[in-house]
Amino acid sequence: MRHHSAFVAVTTACVAAGVAVVAAGVAFGQADRFYPSRWGADDQRGAANRITPAKVLEARNLITRGAVYELGRTYEAGMPLFGTRHFSLRIPQTYGPMGANRTMYHDEVVSAEIGQVGTQFDGLGHIGVGDLFYNGHDRADFSRGDGLIKLGVENVGALTTRGVLVDVAAFKGLDVLGDRYEITRADVTGALERQRTEIRAGDVVLVHTGWGSLWLADNARFGGSAPGIGLDAAQYLVEREVVLVGSDTWATEVVPNPDPELQFPVHQLLIPRNGIYIFENLATEALARERVYEFAFFYAPLKLKGATGSPGNPIAIR
Amino acid sequence: MRHHSAFVAVTTACVAAGVAVVAAGVAFGQADRFYPSRWGADDQRGAANRITPAKVLEARNLITRGAVYELGRTYEAGMPLFGTRHFSLRIPQTYGPMGANRTMYHDEVVSAEIGQVGTQFDGLGHIGVGDLFYNGHDRADFSRGDGLIKLGVENVGALTTRGVLVDVAAFKGLDVLGDRYEITRADVTGALERQRTEIRAGDVVLVHTGWGSLWLADNARFGGSAPGIGLDAAQYLVEREVVLVGSDTWATEVVPNPDPELQFPVHQLLIPRNGIYIFENLATEALARERVYEFAFFYAPLKLKGATGSPGNPIAIR
Amino acid sequence: MRHHSAFVAVTTACVAAGVAVVAAGVAFGQADRFYPSRWGADDQRGAANRITPAKVLEARNLITRGAVYELGRTYEAGMPLFGTRHFSLRIPQTYGPMGANRTMYHDEVVSAEIGQVGTQFDGLGHIGVGDLFYNGHDRADFSRGDGLIKLGVENVGALTTRGVLVDVAAFKGLDVLGDRYEITRADVTGALERQRTEIRAGDVVLVHTGWGSLWLADNARFGGSAPGIGLDAAQYLVEREVVLVGSDTWATEVVPNPDPELQFPVHQLLIPRNGIYIFENLATEALARERVYEFAFFYAPLKLKGATGSPGNPIAIR
Amino acid sequence: MRHHSAFVAVTTACVAAGVAVVAAGVAFGQADRFYPSRWGADDQRGAANRITPAKVLEARNLITRGAVYELGRTYEAGMPLFGTRHFSLRIPQTYGPMGANRTMYHDEVVSAEIGQVGTQFDGLGHIGVGDLFYNGHDRADFSRGDGLIKLGVENVGALTTRGVLVDVAAFKGLDVLGDRYEITRADVTGALERQRTEIRAGDVVLVHTGWGSLWLADNARFGGSAPGIGLDAAQYLVEREVVLVGSDTWATEVVPNPDPELQFPVHQLLIPRNGIYIFENLATEALARERVYEFAFFYAPLKLKGATGSPGNPIAIR
C-alpha cells in the first residue's frame, strides 16, 4: 500500500492535533468501515432520508413574511472554474418566422461540467474513499462512461426542510474570512450562540464566510484557496444529523487542508462516510445581510440520470 | 410583408371559427401592439411580477401534510427530443486517489440544449412575434451568440406561489387525451368545476393530459403531436392573470394547431404577448392520481446568463 | 481470473476452428506477452514508424494523373452512431456588422465523440487487452479524465504512404457483402490476385465491402452488424507489416465475431498487439468504381492532445 | 445607413493612405458588387476551383526527399482562444473488459468551436460583407442554427497543390515580427525575391511571421494583437490567384488593422470577395528553419456539414 508511511504520519499528526483525531481516526484506522449506511445497505439517498413530512411542516412554519431569497449564482462565461472545467452557452441561429403568426424562437446549446461548475450540489456519486463510495459501492460496480448506474443524483429527491445560516464571518467580526481559514467547531457553536440559532436533525446548514464577495471580483484569489469548515466542525455537523452543508465558497471545506497530507477530507467525511450533501458557491450574502438565520429551504436537484451533482438555484423563504 | 395574404386568410378563418378570434384578433389585427408590457417598458420579468409576498403566504397555507411531489422528469439518453436537439452526459475518467485520505472523485460533462430538452421552462427570450419579443425587444438588439443580453432567464427569479392542477384528462373521462386534441376554454372551466378548484391571479397552472404516460414508452407518438390547450383556453388563462402554464406534454399547447396556418400560436400568446411562462414535460401524474389540485409550487430557473430557458425539477407540496 | 473457464472454452473452440487459432493462441495463451513493441518499450507511434521517406517517394510515384479522391464521409445529424455517441453542430447567432467595412462572421460549436463518430481513425489509446494497451501501458498509468497522458493521437504524425484498395465485394461478385460476413485470408489474397495488386510493408490497406452504400440509406442495418475482416485475414495483414487497415464499415472487422466469446478481437490484434491503426467509415466507393487499387494515401490525424482517435478526410491520389 | 459618415471618413483616409485604396475602393465604392463569382453564380468552392490535375502533378514533382512536415498545432487545454471560444476534451469512464479476449476501449467527448479554435481553416461561410457572403449569398438564405445550408465547408474538397512559404520574418532579419506589424506588398515580394521563390496561380501561400513562437509561451501577447498581411499584400495575393493564404498567427492578417475604422478587412477581401481561403495558427517554424520554401501541400477539410471552418493538420512534403 503505497500510502502506508503517509498514513502513519497523518495519524500521528492527528493525535498531536487533537481536534482532528475523531474524524481522522475514523478515516484512517484499521476499522475504517463506513458502510453499510444507517439507512440500509441498498440506500442511495443518504441524509435525504432525514427529510420527513414533519421537517417540511417545520420549514413551512418559518414562512411568515413571504420573503424569498435566491441562493444560486449566475452561470456565465468568466465565472471561476475548477481546474480545466468549462462552461459554454451559445444561442444558435434562428430561422423563421413560422406560420401566419410569424413565430420565431431561440434556444441555447450548453456544454459544461454542469453538475460541478458554479452553484453546484454534490451528490453521493461525487466523492469516494479510494474506490469505495457511499454505502461501500465500488467504482467498478457503478461508474460508467455514460452515467453512474448507482448513486446518481436523480435518486436524491426534493430537499425541502428547515435551513440555518451560520454566519461565521460575523461571529469573527469580519466581512470575509481569511484565505485558508479553517472554521472550527467552536466557530460554529459560537456563531450559533451569537445568532441564538440551533441546528436540528434534518436541517440544511449554510455557512457564510464572505468569500463569495470575491466571485467575479477576484477569481484568482477566490479559487486559489478557500476558508471553510475543517474536519472537527464537519464532525459537529455530522453529529447534529444534518442533511446538507453549503457555503459561499467553491469547496465549503477549508482548502488546502491545514494537514498537508489530506485532500478534501471534509468532502469525504460528509459524502461517502455520512451521506451528507454539499452545496457550493451559494449566494448567502443577502441572508447574512438581513440576518435571516432560520428559513424554509427548497431545492430539488435536476434529475440528471447517473450524474454526480447538479446545478441549482435553491430558495430560502421567510 | 410576405405573409400578407396569409394573414387575411387566417383572420377570415378565425372569424369563421369564432372561438379563436379573440386571441387571433389580437395577434393579427392592425393594432397588433403588444408592448410595452403592463409592467413597464423596461421590465424583463413578465408575469413573475405577479408573485408577491401575499402569494407566497397563500402557497404556504396550502402546506398541511408535508407531502412533496417532484415534477421534473429524468434527463437521460433516450428521452424524446425535439428536432435535432441532443442530450449527452459522460463521466470522465477518474484519477487518484489523492492524499493520505485517498480521495477519489467523479464529475460529469454534459452537452445539450439544456434549457430546451426534457422538463423545460420557457423564458421570455424563447419566443417572438417575428423579430419582436416580450416588451417589444427586437432580436437585433438582444440576441447574441454567447447569450441574450436582454430577457435572459437569469432575470426571472423564484416562482413560489399557489399551484393548480387542471386534470382535463379526468374531466374527459380518459387516461390520456387523444392525439392533437385541442383543450378548449370549456374543458378548462369544466375541469375546474369538477375539481372544485379556482384559478387566481398569480397562480401557476399545470394541465394534466395523460400524454406524459408515453414518455420513453412511445417516443415517436409522444413527439409526433400533442394534445394541449388551444388559443381560447390560453386566452382564458391570460384573463385569469396566471404566472405560468405547464403540462405533461412537450408543447403545453396543441400541436399541430387546428388552424394549419398557425405555428405555436399559444406560445406566442403567452410568452411575448403576455409575459406568461410555459413549463413543458412536467411529471403531473402523481398529482393527478392523488387528486392534488391545489398545492404550494416552488421553482427557480437556473440563472443561466442569457439563456432562453432552464431545465428544472419543480416541487409541489401539500 | 474471473474469465478463466471462458478462456479454456475459447481456446478449445479456437483449436477446433483451426483458422482462428494463430491469433487467438497469441491472445489467450499463457505467454500472452505482446510488449514491448518491436519499436521499443517507449514507442508511442506503432506502425507509423514503418513510414519512411522511401515509402513517401513510393506513394509519390503512384501519382500520374493528378486525380484526387476524398475518403471522408460528411459529419452530419442523422449519420449512424455507435451506442449513445452523439454529434451536434450549431451555428451561433451573429452580431454585427463590425467596422466601416461591415464584417460579419459565423462560427460553429460542435459537441461529439469527435474521434469516434463518422469517418474515424483509431489511435493506440483506443483499445486494450484488459487494462494493458499498446506497449503494455496500463490504463491506470495513462488514462486521465482530460486526456490520455500516453498514446494520445497527437503522437501519430502524418501517414503518407502507398495505399491499396482490396475490393472484396468485387472478388465475391457482389455489390455489398452480406451481413456479418467474415472476410477470410483467402478472400484477401484472392481479391489481391484478381486485382493484380500486392501489399507491401508500410502500406495502408483499405478493404471495400460495399457496406458503405447503407450509410444514411439504412442506418439500422448499417450499424446492426458489419461484414469485415476476421482474425485470420487480420493476421495476414499483420504479417504483411501494414500501417493501417481501413474500410467502408463502422468496425472494419466482422461484427459480431463468428466466435461468440470474442468482442472486437481484430481491433485488439491490430491496435494493442501490433500497433496497427484502423480507419472506419471510409468512402471507398469511388476507388472501387474506378478500380483504383493502388494510390498515394495522405492523412494526418488532428493533433487532439490525449485523444484516442481523430476524425478525418483522408485523400487518395492517382 | 448608420455607418455613412464613417464610410466617408474611411474613404478619405484610404485615399490619403494611397496603398490601401485599391482594395478599400473595391470595398466601399458605389460599385461594390463582388458577385457573382468568377466561377459562376452557383459556385460554392471558390478558389478551390483553381486546383487542377496539373496543379496536383506540379505538387507531386516537388516531392524529392520524402520529408514530411505536419503543419497543425496540438489542440489542448491552455491553447490561446479567441473571445469566449472553448475547447474541452474528456475521456469517459471505461467499462469492461468485454468478451473472453477482454477488450477494453476508450473514446473521447469534445466540445469546441471546432472549426475556429487552434489550427483552423476558414471556409466561405465564415465571413461576410454585411449579410452578403461569397457569391452574394444572403445570411437569411443559408444561415441556420444546425448548419449553413450553403457554403458549408463540406463543399471545399481536397486542397492538394503547390505550396509556398513566404518567410517575412527572415526577410526583415527578425525571429518574430513586431506586434501589430503590417506586412506590405513590398515585404511579400521582397521575401519572395530573397528566397528566389515565385507564387503561381493555384498555389497555397503560407506566411511565416515567427508569431507562432508565442503559442502557449505568451498567450496574452499572442492573442492581444498579431502581425500579418495588410490589405495591399492581400491584394497582391489575390492578383496572383492563390487558393489559400495561411500563417502562424491567429488571424493571418494584421490585427488591429492600421486603419482603425476597419475590422478584419483582409478576411473580407480574401473570403467573400475572392473566394480565397485562410488557414490560421499553422506550425510554419520547421519549414522556415529548414528553408523549405516550395513544397507539396495536402489538406482536406473535415466534411462537417454546414460548418464555417474546419480543424486540420495539413502536410507539407519535399
Image (tube, coloured by chain):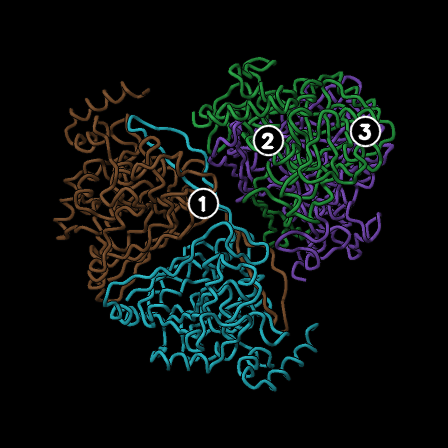
Chain colours: A cyan, B brown, C purple, D green
Tell me the residue at 20%/56% (across/down).
Answer: B294
Q: CA distance from mark 3 to mark 2?
A: 31 Å
The location of residue A247, given as percent across then percent down, is 44, 67
For label 1, the residue is B78
Q: CA distance from mark 2 to mark 1?
A: 53 Å
Q: Which mark is residue D293?
A: 3
Closer to the eye: label 3 or 2: 2
Q: Which residue is mark 2?
A: D259
Asked which secondary structure carries label 2, the reply is loop
Q: Which label lies toward us, 2 or 1? A: 2
Where B165 sits versus A7, above or below? above
Three-letter residue code for mark 1: Gly
Q: Position of residue C58 (x, y in %)?
A: 85, 28
How far is disc 3 from disc 1 in space, using C-alphas?
Answer: 53 Å
**Mark 2 nearby-residue class (10 Å; few <14, some 14–19, many ≥20):** few
Q: Chain ID for label 1?
A: B
Is C24 or A224 nearer to us in this picture? A224
SS assignment at label 3: loop
- Tag 1 secondary structure: loop
Residues at marks 3 and 2, common chain? Answer: yes
Q: Does the image show residue C313?
A: yes
Q: Chain of mark 3?
A: D
Q: Is residue C44 left or right of residue A153?
A: right
- Disc 3 packing (10 Å; few <14; some 14–19; many ≥20): many
